[in-house]
Image (cartoon, coloured by chain):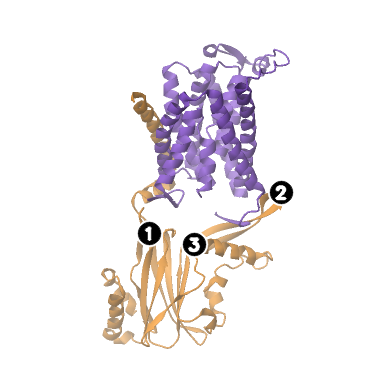
Chain colours: A orange, B purple
Amino acid sequence: MAASTSTSLLPQYRGWLGGLLIVMLSCITLPSHAASPLVADLSNYHIEMDSGFNGTRIFLFGARNDNGDVVVVIRGPDKNYIVRKKENIGGIWINRQHINFFAVPDFYAIAASKVLSTIEQDNLFKRLRIGMDFILIPPHPDESPANFTEFSSAFAQYQHKRKLYMYIPQKVSFVGEMLFKTTIDFPDNIPPGDYTAEIYLISGGEITGMQSTPITVVKSGLDAFVYTYAHTSPILYGITAVVLALFIGWFGGRLFEKI
Amino acid sequence: MNIYLPIAEMSVNVFLLLGLGTVTGVLSGLFGVGGGFLMTPLLIFIGVPPAVSVSTVANQIIASSASGFLAHWRQDHVDFKMGNYLLTGGLVGSSLGVMMFRWLKQGGHLDLFISLSYVTFLTMVGLLMAGESLRAIFKVARKPSSSNKLPMAMRMPFKVDFPKSNLRISGIMPIAIGLFVGMMVSLMGIGGGFFLIPAMIYLLGMPTAMVIGTSLYEIIFITANVTLLYALTTQTVDIILALFLLTGSVVGAQFGSKLGAKLPSEYLRAMLAALVLCVAAKLAIDLFTPPANIFSVSAM
């Protein structure tokens, strides 16, 4: 595939122009692949979060060799969540009902060249889980409670508030007939893990081109060290916490005794 | 200036954390209490998950107890034998508490349980202290107790000698007190001195001079046990958060104790009682106010 041959050249290019240039070059220099209906690439595949991490923006650019709408979906690592609903019992608000959401994406961003509802898609979005309506589906259709949507929209709102779910798609804009571009913003609280960027070319209710590219998000620096230490060697971590506190207590006591 | 807390997984302003540490430190120096009862609800209030708040405050209390303990030990004001009896119950109680904590968290009732325990416990202690300090201020003589009954611990079986405290009481009583306080440490994120000190004076009949040093001795080991168990089972001890709180509280405690030396103790206790009752009232009101969002989300 044209895009994969050009990937190795990419990391040094951060912006639009470099990327667009490469996509164009790959179209020209590799005429045998010109038939490939869709090629796309990202400005960055690897996000490192250190203690000063303030969020980041990734540029996506590509070319289509066919007519159709472009939809870009970024999914974060899967996670299990439990959503609880409080009820008033004797004046006090107590958690009663709950629904588990297994393996839901912890991050979800979307960009499209047209308003989603105007794209002819014939149940495609539901199958591919594109758009807010289809991210969360009942775990077992037969045993899902009637108020599933109430819980799922509460969850989506929770993620939206944390800037991890995007309600309104970003704009995918075209440069001429073939080239397209968009940006994806990652907030400062993105969960670390494996992400995928899926780029679809949709025309006449069918997928005419598709590409999937992985993005990795890792913690780095002291935070990452503490987090990994706590989770991989919990006994040593606990002992460190205790010894550190004992030492500071003793040291602090000695220090102020002299003053 | 923000710092990212790796275990709580959130960004918090450094000065807010140092300020929290200092305020609770001043209080602990002023009133001679650990300050956990204030620190844990405040951390939850700024958005630190309850599980992280409770285990991290336990970690922080190790340090404040250790420095206090050293001072009392140098003056030979620690009854180690009594401390070990309390500790025996305390280790069992705090371990049970950690198990209960996980069970409550899975059931989704942890936050409610923490609030209810705080409201009950703080109201009780606050009212007792308020009554006692107001009587002292207005010089109202305590009604003589109905009879000169011996403390309960003296009437129970399995008598043990505690030469340091000059006591011969049932060994069951300190173990039972330790058990109860241990559970509170792991469930509420407090040191437990609040309950332990009156219990040692009134239920065990220990001499006042021995009480604080001995309770600090017990609290060091209980909070260490709780820190270890939470690090092992839930990975919710945030060392970075603990370090910031510690730094603030070590400094604050020095100001607090200097300030405390200048104020009459009955007024101090009345002020502490008022503070405790305020925290309790705030938590009680929250229990009955309709929440902004009736849905809550947590990771599994």
Are there few (<14), some (14-19), or many (20+) residues within 10 Å of tag 2?
few
* Residue neighbourhood size for the residue with mark 3, other residues' Cα within 10 Å, grouped as few (<14), some (14–19), many (≥20): many
Residue, x 54% and y 80% (percent of image)?
A117
Asked if one can make out residue B89 in the rendered structure from this viewpoint, the answer is no
Q: Residue at x 49, y 22 (%)?
A: B213
The answer to whether A209 appears left or right of B281 in the picture is left
Question: Does residue B124 appear to the left or right of B64 in the view shown?
Answer: right
Tell how many labels: 3
**Residue on which disc 1 sits:** A54
Q: Quadrant of the C terminus of chain B?
A: bottom right
Evaluate whether label 3 is on the same chain as label 1: yes
Give whichever of discs 3 and 1 has the lower sequence position: 1
Residue that badge 3 annotates: A106
Q: Chain of mark 3?
A: A
Residue A148 position within the rendered picture, expressed as x and y whole percent measured from the top left = 64, 65
Q: Quadrant of residue A29?
A: bottom left
Residue at image point 29% right, 87% down: A31
Q: Are marks 2 and 1 in contact (CB under 8 Å)?
A: no
Q: Position of residue A155 (x, y in %)?
A: 57, 62
Front disc: 3 or 2: 2
Depth check, front residue: A255 or A210: A255
Mark 1 surroundings: few (<14), some (14-19) or many (≥20) residues within 10 A:
few
- Does the image show residue A188? yes
Same chain for labels 2 and 1? Say yes or no.
Answer: yes
Q: Position of residue B299 (x, y in %)?
A: 54, 55
Q: How many angstroms separate mark 3 from mark 1 (CA)?
A: 18 Å
Q: Which mark is residue A91?
A: 2
- Kindly identify the amino acid type of the residue bearing the numbered disc 2: Gly
Query: Considering the numbered disc 3 on the image, is that residue within a helix, a strand or a loop?
Result: loop
